[in-house]
Amino acid sequence: YDFSNVATYLDRAEVRAALGVGQRKWSDCNHVVALGFELSGDWMQSYEKKLPDQLGDGVRVLIYAGDQDYICNWLGNQAWAQAMPWPHRADFAATSPVPWMAGGKQAGTLQSSHGFSFLRVYDAGHMVPRDQPANALAMLHAFLDGEM
């Protein structure tokens, strides 16, 4: 992703003044800050083993992936979602993905059963909300409104 426009904007004198950051330069990834999170244990974790209990307790779960994501590809995400052991695994695996509509057009495919949904978002990479902001908002609304 090219964040150069963000850096250009955040480097403007009036923006730095409004943010109160003085002469500090914007960095899209601060490795010192990231290292602090890593060393404290606050880093990426797998929640796959916690999802079955959550689903069993009635907590709805949405897993989504952009179909252009080469970091966390949608095929791999879909494979673990279908293979995850939980009480309704067979029901979920038996459902076929159906077209997911957003803004009046097909924006992906959705596989859903018993409160567990896997959404493949078309024309989106690793950062679905950046690549497809309107569709990401529609996804969020649909999930929060119980439509997924």
Image: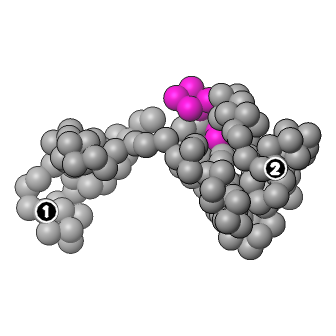
Q: Is residue 67 magenta?
A: yes
Quadrant assignment for the C terminus: bottom right
Q: Position of residue 56 (x, y in %)?
A: 70, 60
How many labels sit on residues?
2
Q: Which residues are magenta?
A: 65-74
- Secondary structure of residue under mark 2: loop
Q: Is label 2 or label 1 in front?
A: 2
- Residue 135: name its quadrant: bottom right
- Which kind of residue does numbered mark 2 sit on? His
Q: Which residue is mark 1?
A: 21
Whether residue 60 sits left or right of residue 13 in the image: it is: right
The tag on residue 88 is: 2
Question: Which residue occupies 57% across, 44% down?
Answer: 49
Q: Position of residue 143 (x, y in %)?
A: 71, 64
Q: Judge by depth and name the residue closer to the eye, 76 or 7.
A: 76
Whether residue 5 sits left or right of residue 128 in the image: it is: left
Tag 1 or tag 2, which sits nearer the N-term? 1
- Secondary structure of residue under mark 1: loop
The vertical placement of 120 against 42, above or below, is above
The vertical placement of 5 against 80, above or below, is below
Whether residue 35 sits left or right of residue 73 in the image: it is: left
The tag on residue 102 is: none
Q: Is residue 95 magenta?
A: no
The main secondary structure of the magenta stretch is: loop
Q: Position of residue 11 (x, y in %)?
A: 21, 52
- Which kind of residue does numbered mark 1 sit on? Val
Quadrant assignment for the N terminus: top left
- Residue 16: name its quadrant: bottom left
